[in-house]
Structure formats: structure tokens, C-alpha cells
Image (cartoon, coloured by chain):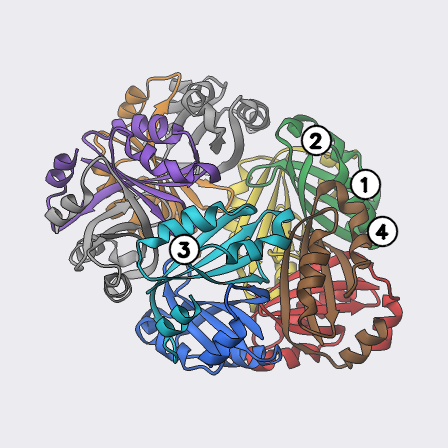
Chain colours: A yellow, B green, C red, D brown, E blue, F cyan, G orange, J purple
């Protein structure tokens, strides 16, 4: 499984709707509107690394109201729980 | 449920062990070693907001090998899945 | 009680009116026009954490003349005075 | 009344005690441990502007465990409540 | 006496006239066009702290051609000369 | 006359004495301890441009307690007052 | 052989096509769409240093959809493989 | 094939040897000492995404003389040449 | 002699012509289009310090295609060659 | 001819001697101690591009008292004077 964390800066007038829109993008697990310099954090869980371009660049990056994105791809994931099960259950 | 995303800068020589140590902290859901300017991203899921200080400041912040942290607390969470169920199952 | 400190960058031509407008937003305790890189600092005091999204994102963030915001949520509050009493008296 | 907001970066190992220590400094109203790039935010309320140097530079700046400070002095304060009464009651 | 140092970023096409305009604002002592990241530095000398908002926010901040300002208020002034005399002579 | 504005970051434990020490350096007109990211602002007034190296690099830069400096040299000075008279009276 | 690494920030709406366009510029070896603060990384391999201006400034810099570039020129190249052969084969 | 670009800040006294050492790490294709804010750029070519953690975090990150790293993982690669052939020939 | 180094950010579409235009400004010695975050570096050599405002602010700063400038004035110049001769020969 | 501009941050206690030392490095044309965020600017003029690594990395970078360097290599040089003649005369 490939995980990625995408930081999102929103257009000011899109703030109220953007959370819901981002959650609808295929491959997106969770979306949080957050405190701090960024407006949203999107957590992506994908079966194959090759899906990243499609989900992040073509998907999230083009959602109406997204001004800027910065993606962090996970080298490794650590948890006391079985993330593969957790997020495939979730998918 | 209160969610938080904690960005972590690690001491150089703690990189190899820090992922596992962070995953052991009570309240931590997932830990990712990541590309980019930060070294790890920790996702926290808590039943009550008041637990944040204990889990983030006293917990994560004091783990051996953590050099600097920056926390983003979630105002709201958005997902096509029931996050409460997902992360309490996970807890 | 949940406290938050919101840093505000104002549109140049809104500077004179913005302080008063921000003080009118439900949940806002004090507003200061300040020296330094930011233009205003807003202190928010809320009975429940869940009100944050409504007061900060939907409230403060949408006030006419606000160009950019950066929110810091309090983990803990410290004072020689009873802040709950102080700010509920104030509310 | 002169108000100031002081952003504080803490020494890593002083995090747990610093909130209480800062609240003890004469002229300090409220101290918050916060999310984001800074560790604490201190709100100062003073009868006279001339007290700022004593409270901020000689007081807060020298508290054991403070690594870096950045002060924002208020030009003006805005509130639906009488801040002079609120904070002199609090003093 | 309250002193403040205001860093100014100018609109490109206002550079030639802005120095003179800023020097005309009541309370402004000296204006320098400078090397470095900022375009002008304005030194303000005021009898009372309360005048800051009027001189800096309503005065300097609204001068035609000012794009961005960043104010540093003086806690204390040090000099081998009597600044009160020097700048009241100057006023 | 050549004017320069020198921004100073101080060693934490030198804050209390540094203002006075800087004011003693030949060529320094005024020293202010200030709010914001820097700790002191020093205003230098010199008869000849060639004195800058001696006053700023060899003088101010080497004062005990100075951690970092950033100098802005004035291209031009603007004032409703005669700065040459003002600052040579002051010298 | 002269090598250079050019970091590219793209216009939001050019993301999908820009990779292919950049790869067509004479002298460009590889183009990667990447995670992090930049959108693309372009690796340039040139027979003569003098070609840099033509390939980077006149070529890459003027491709439709490029918002900002930052070039790093290689002082030296290190590899277990013969880069001259590898990249002239590739050219 | 997974490609990554790793920016490296070197310890001052390791500059002369670090290029060669980095080129010896398994999975590293090319290493360039470069102009600009970073000291080296390392280009990694891997058969499987899962090797990233081992090559970047455990490999490059631990090479003696590396002070700081920042990794950009490629979503997609674009070239007029067959990069798989080019870099597997090179491997 | 007064020397200054002026860093220039160019309007994207002025890149090709700006080097030549800058070289025509009175007092400019050399102009380089460069790698890195800035686009051009201009080296100025002047007989008198007072010419700086005219050459840098009124001259270079107003050349068509200049978006942003940052000037560094030399305190002192060091060389194995006689710079006065070298640059007056050049003037 | 290859030209490069090297920005230098100095160790505090090396400021007084570093200008002279840098001017002694083979390939260095002019050294300026400067205002602003950097301490020195070094202008390098080389017959061949390949000398850059030797002069900048092995030469300038290793001079005692140099804390940090950032090099900008010139794509092109523009001047009303013959720079090749000017700087080979100077060499």
C-alpha cells in the first residue's frame, strides 16, 4: 500500500465546500480542515504507487477551489493496527 | 472525535527507530516517514479534545529522537467512510 | 473551555474597519491591531471545541477584508486568574 | 491600557513547566500552549506603556526555558466587553 | 516619548515620490530609502503611545504607494544624547 | 551625511546590557530595543560613507552580545527637519 | 559535459501537459513531476557550458505553463557509470 | 521504475569526499555537486517503490557528512529516450 | 569608489532583453544572468556614494521588465588588482 | 569566460580578516563586504567552466572563517566594456 499526505491551500471563497469535494476524489481516505498555515490535510491510501500521479496531480490538484498543494509521500507506515486491513476496510 | 496531524523533525541518528517509537504513544493512529522538509507525519485520533496536551505535548513531543514538532488540529473531518467507527475499530 | 489565537492579514483598504467587524463575530473575546508581520490578533474563547470550525472558518475567515488567517489552538491555558469565570463574565 | 501578545519558542525539555512559570510573571494575563510553529502565546495587559520593557524583555524573556520570543504590541483593542474592567478585575 | 521603526515595501511605480510623501505624515521624524529587502524605513517619535494607531495605521499605512508595512515599536531608547530634546527640537 | 539602519539579534543573556553598549559605539545616533523578530535597531549617522565599515563591521558587529546583524544603508533621507543639523547637534 | 537541475513551478492549469512539453526542449534529458514544494524537476545534459543560457533561459524558461524556475548548475558529477556515455547514448 | 531526487546539505568539512561516497550507495544513479542553497543533488532510480525507504532513509540519509536531506519522489517521468532502458543499462 | 551588487527578479517575458537594457544604465559595470532564485546580478561602480540613489532607485529599479530588486552596498572592496584603475578603465 | 557570484556568510569572529583571505584565492576577481543578510560577495572570473569546482568548492568554500556559501553561476554576461579584456587584464 502507498500512503501520501497532501497539504492544501484553498481559495478563500471555496473554504466551506472544499472539504466535501476533496473527500469525493477516488483514493482519498480522510480530509481534515486544519489550524496553521495550510487549510486542509488530505490522507491518501493507494494499492499501487503508480496511482499517485492520477489521484494527486490529476485528481486532488484539479479540484475547484484548490490554490496550492504540497505532497509528502510515505516511505514507510508504522501503527499498532493493521493499516492494510484498516484502510482497505475503509475503501 | 478530535483529530490532529503532527509534523516531526527527527534527530539525524534517531531516524531508523523513531517511527516505531512514535506508533507506541497512546492516542497515535498512524505514523508515516515521509519525503519533503519534515521527517515523519503522525495522525492522532482522540475521544476528547482535552487529551491533546497529554498526547501531543507530553507524549509525542518528549519521545527520544524528536527534535521539533508542529501540530495542526482538525476543525472538521470529511470522509466517505465513518471515521469514528474506522478509528475506534483501529483503537 | 477551548481557546484559540487567530493571526489575521488584512486587505490594505479594510484596515480601519476590520477591528470592529471582527469583534462582532460570535465567540470572539478580544481583537488587537498589532505591530509586526500580521495586522490583527483575535482571541477566541469557546465552551465546546466543536464550535471552532463555525467561529474560525465560517465566522472570522469570511469577514469582509480578511486576506489570510493562521489559527493556533490552545492545548492548555495557564493564569493566576480563573479564566473560565473571567471569560464567561466577559461573554 | 497597553496590551501585547508575545510568541514563545521553548527549550524542548522545559515544555512541561514553562506554562506555569510564564503565568507567574507580573503583568501576564493569560498563557496558552498552542499548536503551530510557536510553543506558547502570552497575553500581557499593562496600565502604562513604559512597563513593556520590564515585563517583556526583563520578565518573560529571561524565564528559564524560553529560547526565543517575538512580541506584537497592540495599537488598538476591540471588544464587545469592557477590556479595562475585564483585565483590571483579572489583575 | 514613544518611538517606532516602520519598514515599508513600496509599489514599484511610487518609488520616486514616496519618500517625500511619508516625511509629510504628522509624527514622522525621518524617512530613509534603503538597500535590502525593504524600500523605506520610517522613524516615528510620538509624545504618547496612543498616537501610534493614528500615525502608523491610519497615517503611514494609507499613504498612496505603500504596499506593505511592518512596525517595530521601541521598548526602550538608548543614546549618548538627550533624545527627548533632540526630537522635540526636531518636531 | 551617510545614514544606516542596523538590525541586531542579541545573545539571550546579553539583552539587558546590550542597548547601553551599542549606544557607546562611535557614530551610533540612537539605539532602540524593539518588538518583532529583531531585538535592537541601531541608527547610524556618519559624515563620510567610508566610515561605514569601521562603525558597522568593526564597531557594532563586534560588540559583546551581538549574535547577528543586518545593515540597511540609506540611499536618501527625507524629513521636514534639517537632518544634518539635527544629527550633527546630536553628535 | 555540463549538467544542470532546473526546479519548475507550473501554472495550475498547465500541470497535465507541461511534463511532455518540457521533455521536447533540446538538451533536456529527463523530466519528473514530483512531490514537495516544486512541481517538476528537469535534468539537462549539455556538451558545452555556453549552451546553458539557450536551453535554460530561452528554452525551458519560456515553455508555456512555466511560472517560475530555479536552476542548479553542477560543479561536478559522480557516478559508478560513465555518464558521458550514458547521456550521449541517451541524446 | 520509481525515480527520486534527493537534495543534500553537507557538513562543511565533508564537501570534498561526499560526492564519491553518495555515488557508492546502492540505487543511486547520478550525484551532482551544485550551485545554490543545496550542496548536492542525488538522482535515484529503483525497480520497486518499496526500496525507497532503504535507499533514501537508511542509505543516503546515513552517509557520513550528510547534514540534511529533502527528497522529491517522482509521480511520473517524461523523456524522448527510454528511461527504463537507459537507467537499467546504467545499473 | 562606491560599489554595489543589485539582485534582480525579472518579469517572465522580459528575460531575453533585460540583460542588455540593464548594461546600458549609467554607472553599471557588469550584468550577469544567473542560476538560482534571482534572475540577474548587476555590479555597480560609482565615483561618489551620493550617485547610488540615482543609479539604483531611479536607474536600475525603473528599467522596463524589472519586477523586484535587492541592493547590497559594499562597505569595503578587496582584490589583488587595483579596482579603482580596473573599473575607471572600464568606465 | 565563466563568471560566478558567491554569497558568503562568515563566522562572527572572522569578519575582519576574511575579505583579504578570500581575495587571495586563485580565480577570485573582487571581494566586497556588504550590507544585508550576507557578509561578503565574491566575483569569480574563470577561463574554463571546469575550474568552478576547484575555485568555489575546494577554494572559497574551505577558507577559514567561511560558515556558508551560495553560488550563482552566470549564464551570460552583459557590459558596455569588453569583460574578457577587463578581467584578463585584471588576472
Cα–Cα gap, marks 3 and 2: 37 Å
Cα–Cα gap, marks 4 and 3: 41 Å
Q: Are marks 3 and 1 in contact (CB under 8 Å)?
A: no
Residue count near mark 1 (Cα–Cα under 10 Å), binned few <14, some 14–19, many ≥20: some
Q: Are marks 1 and 2 in contact (CB under 8 Å)?
A: no
Q: Does mark 2 fall on the same chain as mark 4?
A: yes
E33 vs D79, left or right, is left
Residue count near mark 2 (Cα–Cα under 10 Å), binned few <14, some 14–19, many ≥20: many
Q: Are marks 4 and 3 in contact (CB under 8 Å)?
A: no
Element marked by disc 2:
helix
Q: Nearer the viewer, mark 3 or mark 2?
A: 2
**Which disc number belongs to residue B90?**
1
Cα–Cα gap, marks 1 and 4: 13 Å
Q: Kindly identify which residue carries mark 2.
A: B18
Residue lying at 70% horizontally and 71% vertically, measured from the top left: D3
**Which disc number belongs to residue B47?**
4
Amino acid at each position: 500500500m502507498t500512503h501520501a499526505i497532501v497539504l492544501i491551500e484553498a481559495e478563500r471563497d471555496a473554504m466551506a465546500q472544499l472539504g466535501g469535494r476533496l473527500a469525493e476524489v477516488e483514493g482519498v481516505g480522510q480530509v481534515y480542515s486544519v489550524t496553521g498555515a495550510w487549510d486542509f490535510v488530505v490522507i491518501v491510501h493507494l494499492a499501487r504507487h503508480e496511482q499517485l500521479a492520477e489521484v494527486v496531480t490529476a485528481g486532488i490538484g484539479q479540484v475547484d477551489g484548490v490554490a496550492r498543494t504540497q505532497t509528502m509521500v510515505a516511505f514507510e507506515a508504522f501503527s499498532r493496527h493493521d493499516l492494510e486491513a484498516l484502510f482497505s476496510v475503509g475503501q
